[in-house]
């Protein structure tokens, strides 16, 4: 105990290599995995890129890395982060499976309505997280708010496709831009988490 702590003052934050936790926070890993994959998803939905890079990212960074981040967060006793990272890691793996096994093969097992149902149930999951997000700061709240809107827009997009509605390219681009915004916000929160931890003080407030 130092003289400062004896008088009720907190010690200066320890150096990076002296962090006393057995498991480091997995928030940066999870947020980067989610954010980067979501940016690619927005680019694809806006028809600026194809599916190749998105599906690869969905398996490894959006999928596997987020699941690992979620397990670490659960190990540390963080139910919110652990459940979120594990859930959305599994979302990207399920998305990859839906796209490659059903949509691209033209299987009769799926349709645009199935994809709309898929995005709608993820809207419900996301809305559940949104209710608790304000406790974790404006950054996380913004991520879940924009993600909730994104899933609603995607549900409409795929339902309209199932109805045979011709969707204008500008509409695809608008939805894609909103999805990209979600990914950028996740990247921002992840960058703040990494930077604030590295310097031991709040440099980027989120």
Image (cartoon, rainbow, N blue to C red):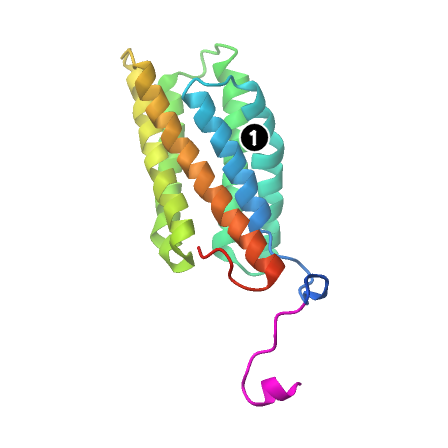
Q: Which residues are magenta?
A: 1-14
Q: Report the predominant secondary structure element of the magenta stretch.
A: loop
Horizontally, residue 195 falls left or right of residue 123, namely: right
Pinpoint residue 126: horizontal percent, then vertical percent: 39, 42
Q: Is residue 168 left or right of residue 11?
A: left
Query: Which is nearer the eye, 89 or 43?
Result: 43
Report x, y in % for residue 6.
60, 89
> Where residue 19 sits: x, y (%)?
68, 65
Q: Nearer the viewer, residue 96 or 134?
A: 134
Q: Name the residue: 45% across, 18% down.
A: 48
Identify the residue under disc 1.
58
Would residue 6 be seen by someone viewing this image from the given angle? yes
Quarter of the figure with residue 125: top left
Image quarter of the C terminus: bottom left
- Left or right, 107 with reference to 5: left
**Quarter assignment of residue 157:** top left
Give the answer, above or below, for where 158 lies relative to 64. above
Element class at badge 1: helix
Give x and y (percent) for residue 18. 71, 66
């Amino acid at each position: 105990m130092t003289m400062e702590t004896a008088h009720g003052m907190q010690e200066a934050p320890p150096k990076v290599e002296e962090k006393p936790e057995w498991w480091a926070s997995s928030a940066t890993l999870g947020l980067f995995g989610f954010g980067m994959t979501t940016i690619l998803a927005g680019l694809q939905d806006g028809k600026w890129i194809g599916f190749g890079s998105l599906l690869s990212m969905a398996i490894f960074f959006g999928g596997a890395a987020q699941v690992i981040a979620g397990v670490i967060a659960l190990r540390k006793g963080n139910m919110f982060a652990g459940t979120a990272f594990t859930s959305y890691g599994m979302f990207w793996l399920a998305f990859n499976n839906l796209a490659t096994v059903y949509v691209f093969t033209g299987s009769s097992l799926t349709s645009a309505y199935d994809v709309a149902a898929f995005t709608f149930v993820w809207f419900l999951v996301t809305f559940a997280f949104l209710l608790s997000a304000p406790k974790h700061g404006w950054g996380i709240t913004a991520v879940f708010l924009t993600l909730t809107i994104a899933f609603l827009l995607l549900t409409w997009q795929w339902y309209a496709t199932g109805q045979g509605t011709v969707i204008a390219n500008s509409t695809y681009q608008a939805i894609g831009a909103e999805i990209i915004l979600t990914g950028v916000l996740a990247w921002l929160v992840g960058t703040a988490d990494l930077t604030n931890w590295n310097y031991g003080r709040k440099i980027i407030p989120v």
